[in-house]
Image: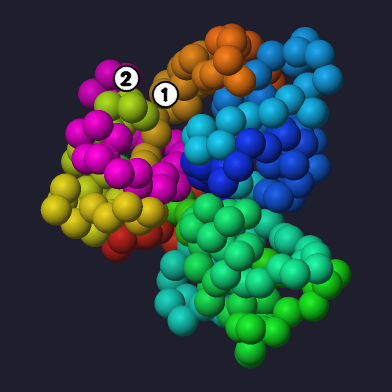
Amino acid sequence: CQAMVTYFPYTNMKLSDIAFYFSIQDYTSLLGPNQLDLSIPDLPNVVLRAAYPIKIPIHSCACSPLLPNSTTRVATSINYTVVDYDTLSGISNAIYSGLVTYRDIGDVSGITNYNLIFPDQSLSIPIPCACPANGSSPHPDDGRPAEIVLSYQVQKGDNLSAIATAYNSSVPDLRSFNGNITNHDLNDADILFVPLSGTHTHAHLRARAKLRDPDVRGHGPWGEVYKMLRCGLQMWGHL
């Protein structure tokens, strides 16, 4: 299926660099989810603030037989090329802001010695993701079940109600997609799956986003993220 992930950049970062790190060939696919206007001058070089949440489309979310838990779905379309002085832990914690562990990067990339990587080596970046479950409950606003699932990295002070409100989801669906998790189970940097309804998937594109200091509103193309595919296998026991 297709999915989304919320990325908190570790430093101020150009839009084109974010696209590069997530193997997105056309940076304009980031415009719609983040309300960036195509008419902004020199758009690829626009700098987005560190730690500001950026929504990234994941074009392939599937189970990986290379991970210890082969039923876990991960992004299978993101690759990273090692440069001088890189380490797996640095790639995991800095570039990808802890969205994926260095062990998982090593395992799916066929690395047996986690301390030994080489410049120009290609790594797979298996960020956890999820597919809509057949049993997801309809959203109270529009009566439609989830059409896409967002991987959200828990931030300090978060709770289920606040996350559900921010993404127009629901606490029951958050709990259903995350093993009946409660607020007491939330830890900073945990990955939480947030099911989004079809109406919210479109409406969220109109939410405000900040670019540097000014407010930016846009109606950029959402591209193929609208065209959701359902996975044959479902997470959390939904078949």
237 is higher (above) or lower (below) than 50: below
Secondary structure beneath label 2: loop
Can you see residue 54? Answer: no
Q: Gap between marks 2 and 1, in whole Å?
A: 9 Å
Q: Nearer the viewer, mark 2 or mark 1?
A: 1
Position of residue 136 relative to residue 96, above or below, is above
Q: Is residue 185 magenta?
A: no
Residue 143's place in the image compared with 109, above or below, is above
Q: Amino acid at mark 1?
A: His
- The numbered mark, 2 or 1, whose residue comes first in the sequence reads 2
Left or right of 67 on screen, residue 224: right
Report the side of 105 relative to 53 (left or right).
right
Q: Are marks 2 and 1 in contact (CB under 8 Å)?
A: yes
The residue carrying mark 2 is 142
Type of the residue with mark 2: Asp
Q: Magenta stretch? A: 139-163
Q: Residue at x 56, y 46 (%)?
A: 10
Q: Is residue 159 magenta?
A: yes
- Residue 91 falls in image quadrant: bottom right
Q: Give the image location of residue 184, x and y in percent.
A: 14, 53
x and y percent of residue 69 in the render? 43, 77
Relative to 13, 81 lies left or right: right
The front one of 87 and 186 is: 87
The residue shown at (69%, 41%) is 18
Residue located beneath label 1 in the image: 200
- Binning the other alpha carbons within 10 Å of mark 2 as few (below 14), some (14 to 19) or many (20 upward) gives few
In the rendered image, residue 38, in percent from the top left (x then y), is placed at: 75, 15
Q: Position of residue 58 (x, y in %)?
A: 60, 46
